[in-house]
Amino acid sequence: MKFEWVEHPSDVGFRAYGRDLGEAFENAALALFEVMTDTGRVEAREEVGVELEAEDEQALLYDWLDRLLYFRDAEGLLFSRFRVEVEEEGGRWKLRGRAWGERFDPRKHEGRTAVKAVTYHLMEVRRGKDRTVVQAVVDI
């Protein structure tokens, strides 16, 4: 399982899984775009790169999802495929990621729930020996 929905009374929450932090971030991004559309219908026609640095893993997750929302808002892009590498260096967390997708086309892409913003509410990052879990809630 890549992700699952988390009950929330007024917003949308999801919990994403991965073998490592990078894969969990990839699956969190997939969940984010599943809130908005059927990602199975989003083709990998355009690629964007993302490089981020943050003070901790939660801030990095927030910044990653927020940057993807920026591309949706500013350029009309929807994404369906992601590749993320995360590393800690000198007490700072660094992310190098790529996202593939295409511009929103209402004839092709189902419009689901509009996401306004990422929040820190109930955000979690839990790393275990064989599995990493991240959780986020988005404002709708």
Image (tube, rainbow, N blue to C red):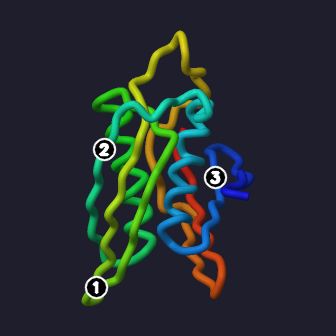
The residue that disc 3 covers is: 13
Mark 3 vs 1, N-terminal side: 3
Mark-to-mark CA distance, 2 and 1 = 24 Å
Depth-wise, is mark 2 or mark 1 nearer the camera? 2
The picture places residue 12, in percent across and down from the top left corner, at 63, 46
Q: Vertical placement of 68 versus 64: above or below?
A: above
Q: Quadrant of the N terminus?
A: bottom right
Dividing the picture into quadrants, the one containing residue 116 is top left
Residue found at x 49% / y 30%: 43
Q: Judging from the image, what secondary structure is the residue with disc 3 in?
A: strand
Left/right of residue 56 with respect to residue 11 in the rendered view: left
Q: Position of residue 53 (x, y in %)?
A: 27, 69
Q: Which of the numbered marks, if any, corresponds to residue 69?
A: none
Location of mark 2 (residue): 48
Q: Quadrant of the C terminus?
A: top right
Indicate whether 78 appears above or below 123.
above
Amino acid identity at mark 2: Val
Query: Who is closer to the viewer here, 18 or 43?
Result: 43
Q: What's the amino acid at mark 3? A: Gly
Mark 3 or mark 2, earlier in chain = 3
3D distance between C-alphas at marks 3 and 2? 25 Å
Query: Which element is circle 1 on?
Result: strand
Local crowd size for mark 2, using a 10 Å CA cut-off: few (<14), some (14–19), many (≥20): some
